[in-house]
Image (cartoon, rainbow, N blue to C red):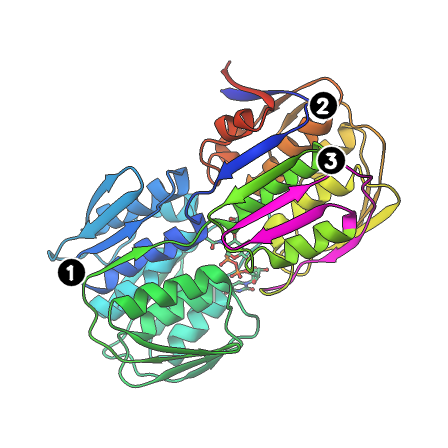
Amino acid sequence: MDALIIEGGQRLSGRIAIEGAKNAALPACVAALLTDEPIILRRVPQLRDVSTILYTLGALGKRVVRNEGSVVISGDGPLSGEANPYSVRKMRASFLVLGPLLARLGRARVPLPGGCAIGARPVDLHLRGLETLGARIDEHDGVVDVSADRLRGARIELAFPSVGATEQLVMTATLAEGVTEIANAAVEPEVLDLVKLLRAMGAEIAVEGRTIRVATSRLHAAEHTLIPDRMEAGTMLLAAAIARGEATADDVDPDDLGPLSDALRRVGVDVQEDGRSVTVSASGPLRGTTIETAPHPGFPTDLHPPFAALLTVASGTSRVAETVFESRFTYVDPLRAMGAQIAVDGRTATINGVDRLRARTIEAPDIRAGAALVLAALAADGTTTLGGLEHIDRGYERLTEKLQLLGAKIERQST
Ligand code: EPZ
């Protein structure tokens, strides 16, 4: 098993190249199921989750050619309506194939995604939305069977602006008859990037506030460059901040990082936005603050754990309220073991800043909590050994090399 060996206390400085967004890449790959013509995606990150979705598409009958940052998904042969149970259980985003397969084949069978470390994560909003479009749904033995003679556009109001349900329903609606209106839709940048790809494929989609209208379309070949990964950029900027250094994330969208930049400024970190880059500089004292996660344009839940790591060394009392996932606090125990003072009550963590964190041997419990532990280790006294890298590898491409380029003493070892 691999481990990261991180010697804390190095000041970081430099520029960081940011990859395409994982959470834009996954639905974009699935959108290729909507047409027989080729979809070319660029700036695709080389991550385990992307390999999983491409494997899923290959098993469904698509031809996938991957060449560094580009992926071509094509194939006009017959599609299978049954998703591979292994890949859906391994990664929840694979469940997005359900609606597109239903729209193409009139039926689909996909396993229910299991629970995961950050919460129960049901799929009721996906299923109720598909029902509203005319699907019959039969859930049994951990599998969902959906079928429909025809899908008809309809108004769907989501009880919560779920990213996955919005993506599932927008994709399905492109092949339904008539107009679909999704109210209280998620409008995360990754959802809007999917909308951009679908428009390039010929879909007629209007986005107004939290309402997305989709008109029926004939979809065709398209080429699309994914947006930059705001979670990778945010994590790297937080790494520079916790290590009291300065760093510039290049080729990002500063607006998409806005909620993080605002929170960093409140902590005392200088943040400069310049066209397509964001620079942080953290030479002064850090002070505690309060954040509350929320659907976009609120503070992103995926940056909650790395931001909480920064707050463990910010003076005074901080609070982090999590409103999106019930179990995003998996970083708390390992950070406490490193000397952080954190108490969790319901969905709120109260953090009392400490002067120093101590290196420990710890395990990454999930992807973003893993990132939080890397950040804590960069600021800790001594050498941390961090296992559980299979989680971190799901979301961060070449993390070790990128941190080394900033001056971190970090190595990946096979043990
Ligand atoms: C996406 O997950 C992201 N994953 C997550 O990124 C991200 O944390 C999340 O959106 C929120 O921004 C991908 O894009 C692949 P949701 P998703 O549906 O779509 C509840 C990362 O670290 N809900 O918006 O699964 C759900 O339980 C990850 O990269 C229902 O109740 O998120 C949760 O509490 C992990 N019923 C909340 O909504 C449903 O049918 C938000 O989930 C669907 C969701």
The answer to whether residue 297 of the structure is visible from this angle is yes
Q: Earlier in the sequence, mark 2 or mark 1?
A: 2
Residues packed near mark 1 inside 10 Å, few (<14), some (14 to 19) or many (20 plus):
some
The verdict on residue 294 being magenta is yes
Residue at screen point 66% across, 53% down: 261
Query: Residue 233: percent from the left, percent from the top?
Result: 54, 45
Q: Is residue 384 left or right of residue 43?
A: right
- The residue to which callout 3 is attached is 333
Q: Which residues are drawn in magenta?
A: 267-295
Residue depth check, mark 2 versus mark 3: number of the one nearer the observer: 2
What is the number of the mark on residue 9?
Answer: 2
Amino acid at pointer 1:
Glu
Choose top left, top right, bottom left or bottom right for residue 9.
top right
Residue projecting furthest to the right = 316
Cβ(mark 3) to ligand 1 < 8 Å?
Answer: no
How many marks on residues? 3
